[in-house]
Image: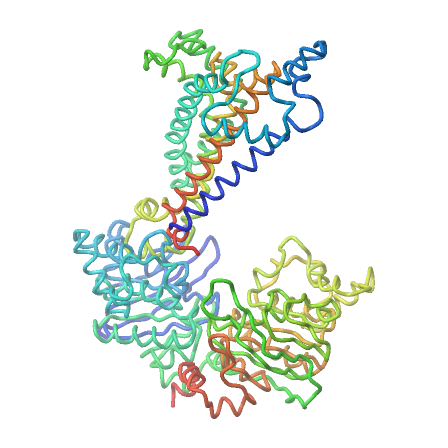
Amino acid sequence: MARYLALRLAILAGTLFAASVVIFLALEVIPGDAAAFMLGLNAQPDTVAALRAELGLDQPALWRYLGWIGGALQGDFGLSYTYKVPVAELIGDRLWVSLPLTLYALALSTAIALPVGILAAARRGGPADITVMGATQLGIAVPNFWFAMMLVALFAISLRWFSAGGFPGWADPLAALKALTLPAVALALPQASILARVMRSALIECLGEDYIRTARAKGLTRGQALRRHALRNALIPVLTILGMQFSFLIAGAIIIENVFFLPGLGRLVFQGITQRDLMVVKNVALLLVFAVTLVTFLVDLAYAAADPRLRTRR
Amino acid sequence: MSGLLQVSGLSVTIGALPVLRDVSFDVAPGEILGLIGESGSGKSMTALALMDLLPPRARRSGSLRLEGTELTALTEARMCGLRGRDIAMVFQEPMTALNPVLCIGDQVAETVRLHTGASRAEARARAAEVLERVGLPPAEFPLSRYPHELSGGQRQRVVIAMAIALRPKLLICDEPTTALDVTTQARIVALLRRLVAEDGMGMIFITHDLGLVAGLADHVCIMRGGEIVERGPTAPLFREMRHPYTRALAEASEHVPARKPAGAGAPLLEIRDLVRRYAGAPGPAVDRVSFTLRRGENLGLVGESGCGKSTLTRALLGLEATQGGSIRFDGAEIPAGAPVPRAVRQRMQVVFQDPYGSFNPRHRVERLVAEPFHLLDRPPKGRARRARVAEALESVGLSAADASKYIHEFSGGQRQRIAIARALVIRPDLIILDEAVSALDVSIRAQVLDLLAELSGRFGMSYLFISHDLGVVRAITDRVMVMRAGRIVEEGATEALFRAPEHPYTRELLAATPSLATALA
């Protein structure tokens, strides 16, 4: 187990290092001057020169890379060029929207998907299964921004249960949660559709395994065999998908954040790119890579918890 | 017969297809009934029908009475109360019969808790006792072990422990030792025999192995095509063998193909001090193995699982790096660790065990059989290629028209013929047969052995025949090597070695191998 953990940690560190180098190279070393790019086509040469000095672009690349990573490790991501505030502060504010939104959506999608997937697998071929398969097909096919707009039209405009967008801040937690509810539902439903299908097919596969027959021969009912034997074995592929969904949700909420006017990370990246604010783009990208690799690491730990074969593998 | 179980007129259909027809037999307490048949004979279906665990679309009719209780009249809930308590079952595949994510103690305790309402601690204590009884003392095999930490034989002991935990009245064993080595099989059979005697259980022992059942069962039923064709007390039945099918089965299981022993040809494959070591393993998987295979000779390699015979095969095929020693093929040296040159690969082919897994299901037979052509410098094209494929298919007893079919259209025996055709198509000097007949029914196996003997006579090919089945090796090889823990422990002319084995391990292997003749003697 210690060896497994050490290996996973090493992979985590290695991935982060490799990703930071790729981000750095992509944004700074590849031809085209970062300062000129940020200032646009009509910039004066002396303004460009001043910005180059400010960004430290006159220093060697390795030095700049070490400075960037060294700062990031201490929580210093530099100054945003457009907002003139520390990038760390910008990210911090946005994270308080994006992270709760992601967790909310993930909790919703899991809470919907697992029971639905289990039901469909247990009643394979029956009306419940056919309904679930049809509904999840629809859930995957419908784009989530369109679905978000339908939610707004129904719950915000017609029924007036929720506001159509914006975020009031965490001063009133209930109001904040309420503001995140429609976006979380819009994000969660397509994810839940995928997850429910994975749960269903994983469970159906496990129900066909020999150990289920053994369990039935011991006297377990069909339901008991499913709950006690098939479910835990089926969780392994489900965990994989859950990990991927977290990564997707934390970065992939750009469109939903725009639909609901939420000041989240997705919008920050989007604005950073349109305003050519490379400081913001670079650091948010690094943060997202960190979040994704961290979640992958946690999923690997969850695998080991679910499957004893991974714990003892040499 | 004062019955424990009375089966009368049991029939099962799946859709419109009858799979069991009017099967009747009795089992008395303490009696062992052997149910024998080839694949598709309905022997496993009989077991599943007794357990009421048939596939969803199967329908059963007839009467199944356990101590007077009509099982077919019971509700599913009542059957759940009966399964595991009164009727228990042991399955063929110990590798997959246990849940990989639960420890063995919990899996055994589950049977106890389910039927007795015992507390977790009581059930675990009972599980420890039962595991001790089947030869897994908790001091050596703690309850917290997981299935993957046990060998196949040990896992089968866990499955047996789950089945006998509550001392059931009837134990059904469906090919419980088919996936195990012969020495392990002998130990498991001894265990089952002891448990039956101690608990006075009735046991139904399902197998395809006549020798095994002859030494174990009190009564025998021979099944074919969903029907019982012959039945009776074991010894008289096998002595008389009234039904032609029983005779055919017995002949096939001891079949020796007619073949001329090979003369002493020139050395074809010379192995000297071959070593294959895996990083992190305690010892080498192949440990300084040396042997010579002559042209036209059939050489056998026997050993139990994990002895290194598959690793050796892969090393010969160039699929494994070696760490020492040398391989000479027809005089040309292949140094250790170097890839096997194409010129050698052209002259060496292999046939694997699994006739289902070793073909790409999306390709037609012509393409499958033509695969080895890529080893040739100038592979035949167009009509020449089709002619070569047709020739190979015809030489294994199939027709040229089969080239345009897909692999799923063939039975297991036919697939193995196609695998042999694939090996033959580039006319190699050596074919390595890695458990090539182990997955086949005895009658099919006899046909394939005849085919192999005929082909080696016709084309003057050599075989390296790798198997755990000593009977088969004895039937088809000139010389044999016995491998254990990576080393060749004994080697000699086949008949002489089988008659007078010198190494204790060879003797142990031979003693553990069930045979109809010795069982009846």
Look at the picture and state if B482 lies above or below A190.
below
Q: Is residue A87 left or right of residue B84?
A: right
Q: Quadrant of residue B44?
A: bottom left
Seen at 46% across and 67% down, the residue is B41
Q: Which of A52 and B455 lies nearest the eye of the viewer?
A: A52
> What is the x, y in percent for residue B62?
34, 61
Q: How is the image coloured?
A: rainbow
Seen at 68% across and 76% down, the residue is B430
- Residue at screen point 51% across, 70% down: B285
Mark count: 0
**Rendering coords of residue A119 (x, y %):** 38, 37
Q: Could you tell me residue A305's position as x and y percent?
A: 36, 45
Q: Nearer the viewer, residue B202 or A185?
A: A185
Q: Quadrant of the C terminus of chain A?
A: bottom left
- Examine the rendered structure and indicate whether residue A136 appears above or below residue B315: above
A151 relative position to B65: left or right? right
Pick the residue in front: A67 or B331: A67
Quadrant assignment, res A126: top left
Compared with residue A23, is residue B271 higher up or lower down, i.e. above or below? Answer: below
In this view, the residue in front, B501 or B281, is: B281
Horizontal side, residue B465 vs residue A153: left or right: right
Q: Is residue B398 above or below residue A284?
A: below
Please tell me in which quadrant of the rendered image residue B473 appears. Answer: bottom right
In percent of width and height, residue A135 lies at: 47, 28
